[in-house]
Image: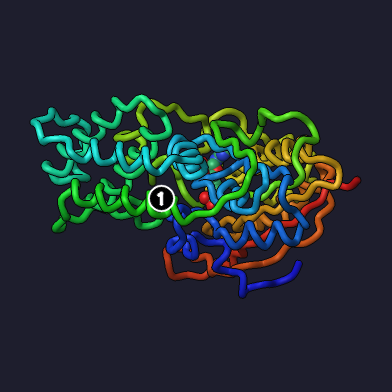
Amino acid sequence: MSEKLEWGKLATFVPNKRLPVYNWFYYKEGFARELVFRVAETFSLGEGSVVLDPFCGAGTTPLACREMGMNCFAFDVHPVSVFVSSVKTRDYDTGILRESAREILETRFRRISLPKDRLIRRTFKKETLEDIILFREEIAGIEDEKVREFLLLGLMNAAMKASYVFKDGAVLRFRKRHVPPLRQMFRRQVHRMIRDLEGFKTRECETRVGFGDARSLPLPDCSVDAVITSPPYLNKIEYTRVYEIEQRLFLGFMKGIPPVRSYIGSLDRKGTGRKEIEDALGRDADSLPEGAVPYFADMKRAIEEMHRVCRSGGRVALVVGNGCFPDRVVESDILLSRIAENAGFTVKNIIVLNKRWCTRHRVEKVGIARESLLLWKKEE
Ligand SMILES: C[S@@+](CC[C@H](N)C(=O)[O-])C[C@H]1O[C@@H](n2cnc3c(N)ncnc32)[C@H](O)[C@@H]1O
């Protein structure tokens, strides 16, 4: 185990907030473009390499791969992630986008019946919601899927900026405030996105983004050179709640897949998987809180899948944080690395990027939780 706290920011989305295309959707759980570049260098990847991200979130890995000319398969179970990652990683004709945006923005206001959904009603001022629904319906009529989804992402972004909601960690908070007209926000957003595309350089490569479960990937054995990813952290965020508004209002047509059971409040599905975890962790499994077992059982399957699809000599870079519990810190970085060894990887390094106090009732210190970059290799 080594420490590189100066890389700490790279485990966060913060550096992406100023980067064109990367910042088309604010995704707090994401990591930085620069992390993918540094890992690619460490693994000596280059044009033509094949990379996998089985937990792609907002698409940082496939987008960085496009900049470097590397082929990438990226999967996620959440509709918002699949949608955002797909829109960010396509080739567009900006002339066609400009023309379609102009037509949509010329839509005249007409009275619209509003959704009954209480969460949605609470999120927007009435006039804003009317405009959102109006544009959403116009966009739905566009035949070209790429243009339609590009404009829908622009609208989704503009809508959230013109909403009363803000995301406070895993919680949605509501605050009534003055909001600018939606039409103006939407115009600005779409034009900014088109300008981004005009200055964004990608190289020839293949990118495939889609729905997929990291525990059983639709890929053949030995088909990738490297995995660059970050799974859900134990007991950290309930993704479904944080992006519920975007999903309900804009992506009702997409259906998700049950996620890794990382969140303690949502663990009561299926068997817990204690037997599988005992096989991989031996005595260490005894000290795991009961609520953490399904997470490690799911992650064991995901790690075995990474091993199956990596070619021999293939490498894995995985960013993960330890789990905070009221009475202890669960060392996910070490436990996942043990599971990886059990699956046939060699653990090359555990690089600690961040250290934070875990607290009980927000004040009592329980212990230090690390956020680490795990580097593994499938031996030749
Ligand atoms: C920490 S985020 C990944 C962030 C990403 N590295 C980025 O920069 O945007 C973890 C992602 O894993 C996804 N996920 C959870 N369970 C999954 C599963 N079984 N298969 C695939 N993805 C899953 C979540 O929906 C979430 O988008």
For mark 1, give the secondary structure. Answer: loop
Q: Residue at x 22, y 45 (%)?
A: 123
- 55 or 264: nearer the viewer: 55
Q: Quadrant of the N terminus?
A: bottom right
Q: Quadrant of ligand 1?
A: top right
Q: Residue at x 81, y 51 (%)?
A: 377
Residue 292 at what x, y percent from top left?
60, 46
How far across and how far down the image is residue 90, in percent?
A: 50, 40
Say if disc 1 is inside 8 Å of ligand 1.
Answer: no
- Write the residue at 58% across / 69% down: 8
Count of marks placed on residues:
1
- Residue 373: give x, y in percent of width and height: 67, 60
The residue to which callout 1 is attached is 25
Which quadrant of the rendered structure holds the C terminus?
top right
Type of the residue with mark 1: Phe
- Is 98 situated left or right of 111 in this image? right
Q: Is residue 55 above or below residue 166?
A: above
| Relative to 199, residue 221 above or below | above
Q: Is 212 or 59 nearer to us in this picture?
A: 59
